[in-house]
Image (cartoon, grey):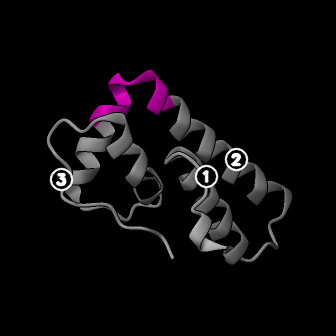
Amino acid sequence: MRHRPQLPLPHEPDCHQVGAVLQSYLDGELGAEDTGVVAAHLEHCERCGIEAATVTRVIDAIRRQRPDLAPDPLVRLTGFVEQLGAGGPDPSAS
């Protein structure tokens, strides 16, 4: 289960706050205001922009290589990427 960060985001979130919602942003799950806040941050923050581009490329590459792959493994992969962005896997999730 994906951890849901505190929403709405502040008008100028820090990198940690953006990282916490990045996968939801990429999946189109955020509301309009939060989507705009994250998009603005990604335009100006090279580090977060690189992270977003990397996650997108990894998921796209997996989909190209394994079009038959069910969404569940992709969900697990994106959850793992989120955990890495948040500082590592949650030991209690094992």
SS class of the residue under badge 2? Answer: helix
What residue does disc 2 label? 58
How far apart marks 2 and 1 lie (CA) works out to 10 Å
Q: Of discs 3 and 1, which sits in the foreground?
A: 1
How far apart marks 3 and 1 lie (CA) works out to 24 Å
Amino acid type, callout 1: Val
- Magenta-colored stretch includes residue 26: no
Q: Position of residue 7 (x, y in %)?
A: 22, 60
Which residue is pictured at 32% across the width and 45% down the height? 17
Vertical relation: 23 (above or below) 46: below
Q: Are marks 3 and 1 in contact (CB under 8 Å)?
A: no
Which region of the structure is painted magenta?
A: 40-49
How far apart marks 3 and 2 lie (CA) works out to 27 Å
| Magenta span dominant secondary structure | helix
Residue 65 falls left or right of residue 1: right
* First reached walking from the N terminus: tag 3 or tag 1: 3
Q: Looking at the rendered structure, which numbered label has been put on residue 81?
A: 1
Residue 49 falls left or right of residue 69: left
Q: Position of residue 8 (x, y in %)?
A: 18, 57
In which quarter of the view is residue 65 placed?
bottom right
* First reached walking from the N terminus: tag 3 or tag 2: 3
Which image quarter holds the C terminus? bottom right
SS class of the residue under badge 3? Answer: helix
Report the front residue among 6 and 74: 6
Q: Looking at the rendered structure, which numbered label has been put on residue 33?
A: 3
